[in-house]
Amino acid sequence: MTGLIGMEGGATISFAPELPSPPRARTGDATSMPVHPFTSVETAIAAVHALDGELEKFELAVADSLQDYLGVQMAQITDSALARGWEPVSFMQRDGFRLYRYEAMRSYTRRGKRR
């Protein structure tokens, strides 16, 4: 998976099927790029709309401040992904944000092709 980090918000996306990678030597603590989670519903939705519609999967970092007790704000973000043919499959809680994983719907029709 490759990274897409903007001024606000973070998402990682997959452009192609993942191929098995050769084994890597572990060198202590694995460090990754810093993630800047989305802090507004509008920018998260804009990021989802900006993604290439042919993506098979992507991850979206959403700040804990958007986790309201009814889930309304995440419902708006997820609705925008569902409308484009991606469904949520999981999330991981991180320090200050959640990293949501979305994948292409199996039964979604894209450009006349049924999966």
Image (spheres, helix red, strand yellow):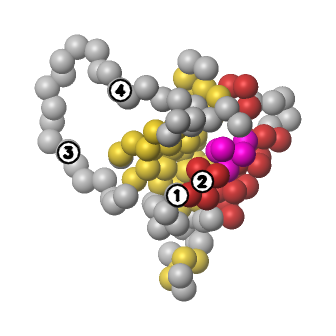
Outermost residue to the front: 7
28 relative position to 35: left or right? left
Image coordinates of residue 49 in percent, x first then y, are: 61, 58
Image coordinates of residue 114 in percent, x first then y, are: 53, 80
Q: Earlier in the sequence, mark 3 or mark 4?
A: 3
The residue where tag 1 is placed is 51
Outermost residue to the right: 70
- Contact, CB < 8 Å: mark 2 with mark 4? no
- Contact, CB < 8 Å: mark 3 with mark 2? no
The residue where tag 2 is placed is 48
Type of amino acid under label 1: Leu
User: How many circles with numbers are drawn on the protein?
Assistant: 4
Give residue 21's mark.
3
Residue at 43% across, 44% down: 4
Image coordinates of residue 30 in percent, x first then y, are: 29, 21
Type of amino acid under label 3: Ser
Q: Residues within 10 Å of mark 1 (few under 14, many from 20)?
A: some
